[in-house]
Image: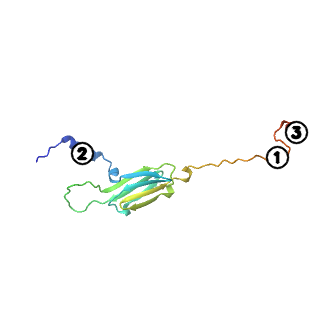
Amino acid sequence: MAQRNDPFREMERLLGTAFRSPSAAGMPLDLYRTGETFVVKVDLPGVDPASIDIDIEERTLTIRADRPADEGEVQWLAHERPSGTFARQLTLGYGVALDRIEADYTDGVLTLTIPVAEEAKPRKIAVQHGTGRQLKEGTVEGSVADEDAES
């Protein structure tokens, strides 16, 4: 059976491969908020945990990881799993506690837990009320009679 060559489909495939972000392709992630915590989950199957590097500079969080290429001479029949060094950057807002970020790598998924900063959490301010100053019995504060008597 003869295969039909579609030059437009081939061009689309080549351009899609050339312009696809290797970082996003090698490091898909989910980001969500649950309660007072932001959670980032990054898929990194086949990555040695020792190769994962997480840095924060100013408000930019950078995740880097290495996935080694298969060694030896092989004849590829399909090669869809990217290898090499991958990096992903996230710009963090001012409402997170940069000093309390935690990272865990389990079953090929890197999970970052980023707590909301205390100063960014909503809070209530209690309103105090009272009966005012205690006055001697029979005196009225601020009356015209008191002001005239003092003059």
Tell me what residue is drawn at x 30 percent, y 45 percent.
19
Query: x, y (%) of residue 99?
Result: 51, 57
Under mark 2, the amino acid is Arg
Q: Is residue 95 left or right of residue 147?
A: left
Q: Is residue 116 left or right of residue 111?
A: right
Residue 6: quadrant of the picture: top left
What residue is shown with label 2?
13
Give the mark nearest the N terminus, 3 or 1: 1
Under mark 3, the amino acid is Glu
Disc 1, SS: loop
Tell me what residue is drawn at x 21 percent, y 42 percent.
9
Disc 2, SS: helix
Q: Residues within 10 Å of mark 1 (few under 14, many from 20)?
A: few
Q: Nearer the viewer, residue 98 or 110?
A: 110
Instruction: Quote the CA–CA distance across marks 3 and 2.
Output: 95 Å
Instruction: Quote the CA–CA distance across marks 3 and 1.
Output: 17 Å
Q: Residues within 10 Å of mark 3 (few under 14, many from 20)?
A: few
Q: Is residue 46 above or below residue 60?
A: below
Whether pointer 3 and pointer 1 mark residues with C-beta atoms closer than 8 Å, the reply is no
Give the mark nearest the N terminus, 1 or 2: 2
The label shown at residue 150 is 3
Whether pointer 1 and pointer 2 mark residues with C-beta atoms closer than 8 Å, the reply is no
What residue is shown with label 1?
135
Q: Is residue 145 above or below residue 17?
A: above
Give the mark nearest the N terminus, 3 or 2: 2
Query: x, y (%) of residue 20?
Result: 30, 47
Query: x, y (%) of residue 42?
Result: 38, 55
